[in-house]
Image (tube, helix red, strand yellow):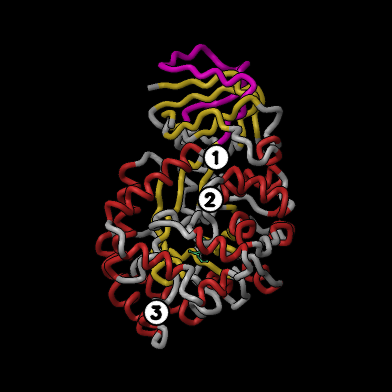
Amino acid sequence: MRTLIVNIKELLQIRENTIKKVSGVDMKVLPTIKNAYLLIENDNISDFGKMEDLNRITADTIIDAIGKIVLPTWCDSHTHIVYAGNREGEFVDRINGLSYEEIAAKGGGILNSSKKLQQTSEEELYLQSSKRVEEIMVLGTGAVEIKSGYGLTVEAELKMLRVIKKLDENYPIEIKATFLGAHAFPVEFKNNKDQYIDLIVDEMLPKIAEENLAEFIDVFCEDGYFSTQQTDRILTAGEQYGLIPKIHVNQFTILGGVQIGVKHNALSVDHLEVLDRNDIIALKNSHTMPVALPSCSYFLGIPYTPARQLIDAGLPLALATDYNPGSTPSGNMNFVISTACIKMKMTPEEVINATTINSAYAMNLSKTHGSITKGKRANLIITKPIPSYGFLPYAFGSNLIDTVLIDGNKV
Ligand code: NIG
Ligand code: FE
C-alpha cells in the first residue's frame, strides 16, 4: 500500500534519525521543505523531498495537499485520560472562590475521582476513556501517554492499567502506560502514610510488573501529597522492576522534586509552574526533559511554566495537555501550542518542536515518532489551506486540521 501526498505547501519538522531532542536556541529552528511531496509505504514514511525532484512514482492513493501544510502528529506525553465521570461541580466551586488545594482538602480533587473510578466497572471505564482517545485523534494527537492514579487500591490501579493496555491494543495511535499509584493518599491511610507506600511497593508494583502493565512510574511530589523522601523511595522501588521515572514536580511548591528526578535519571519532570535557579542547574547536564502543561495553568489560573527561563538557559522543553477531570479537562494539543505562544512567549517554531520531537522523547518514542524522518511512522497532520505554519498557534480556537493520518490511514 503506497500513499503519495503531493503539492504540500510546506512540510515541517524534517530531521535525521539521530536527533532525539532540540534544546536552547536550536528550538527556534524548524527545518522545513516548501512545495514538497511525501511518500508512505506500509505504515511508514518512505520518502519525501521537493516536488521538482519527484520522479514518476506509482501509488495506490494520491492526496493533493495544495495550499496545505503537513507536519508530524502531536505527541501528548502527559495525560490522565482514563477516568470515571467528571468534576464540573468543583469547577463551579472554583468559580465561586475556592482554590484547587481547598477543594482537595474537603474531600474533592483526586479522591473524588478515585471514589468514582472504584465504583465503575472495567467495561464502563474503557467505554468512557475510548471516547476521549477518539476525540484526541481527530485533534491531531498520534501518540499519548496515560497514567493510572485514580484507583489508589491494588484492584482499582490494576483496573486502570488494564484499560490503558486495552486502549493501546484497540486503537492505532501509540499509547504508553504510566503507573501513578502515588497520586494521593487514600483517606484510610491519612494517619499512616508509610503504610500506603508499603502497599505501592510490596503489592502494586510486583503485580504491575508481572502483567507488564506499565513502562513508566510517576509520583505527585507536592506539599500534602508525596514528599521528596517518599518520592525517592517509590522511584527506587519502581526501578527495581524496570519502570522509568516521569514525575509531577513543582506544580505549587518547590520541594526539590526536580533534583530527585534528575538523580533517578527521569525521562521527564512535568509541571514546573514554579521554578528556581537550582532546578535549572540540576536540569542542565541531565537527560531529563522538562515538560510544561499550559492548559492546566489556564484552567486553574496558576502561573505558567517559565519557558523562556528554561529555553534561554539552553534547556529543551516539551509541552503536553495533562488531560484530566480536575485540573485540565481538555486534550486539545492545538490549544496547548496557542497558549504556549500567547502566555509563555514561545515562538511557533519552539512550540512545534516542543510538541513533536521533544514530546516524543518525553515518552520514549524518539525512534518512531515526532519528526518527518524516513522509516518513522506515517502519523501526519494535513492542515486546511492556511497562509503559514505560524497561523496554527495564532488562530487559537479555530479548527485548522483537514486530515489526520495514523500509520498512513485516515482517522
Ligand atoms: O497533573 N497534579 C496532579 N495530578 C493532576 C490533577 C489531578 C486531578 O485533579 O484529578 C495534574 O494536574
Ligand atoms: Fe498530571
From this view, report whether residue 385 is shown above or below residue 318: above
Callout 1: helix, strand or loop?
A: loop
Q: Could you say whether the residue bearing mark 2 is in a helix, strand or loop?
A: loop
Residue shown at 48% from the left, 55% from the top: 79
* Residue 177 is a magenta residue: no
Q: Nearer the viewer, residue 295 or 409?
A: 295
Please count the marks in the image. Answer: 3
Q: Quadrant of the N terminus?
A: top left
Give the residue type that dot 3 points to.
Val
Which badge, 3 or 2, comes first in the chain's sequence? Answer: 3
Say which residue label 1 marks: 371
| Quadrant in which residue 283 is drawn | bottom right
Q: Quadrant of residue 349?
A: top right
Which residue is denoted by mark 2 in the rendering? 330
Kindly tell me whether residue 291 is visible in this rendering.
yes
Is 96 left, or right, of 229 in this rendering?
A: right
Residue at the spot of label 3: 187
Rate crowding at label 3 as few (under 14), some (14 to 19) or many (20 or more) other CA atoms within 10 Å: few
- Residue 105, image x, y percentages: 51, 77
Q: Which residues are magenta?
A: 45-71
Badge 2 amino acid: Ser
* Residue 144 x %, y %: 45, 49
Taking the image as drawn, is residue 287 in sight? no
Q: Earlier in the sequence, mark 1 or mark 3?
A: 3
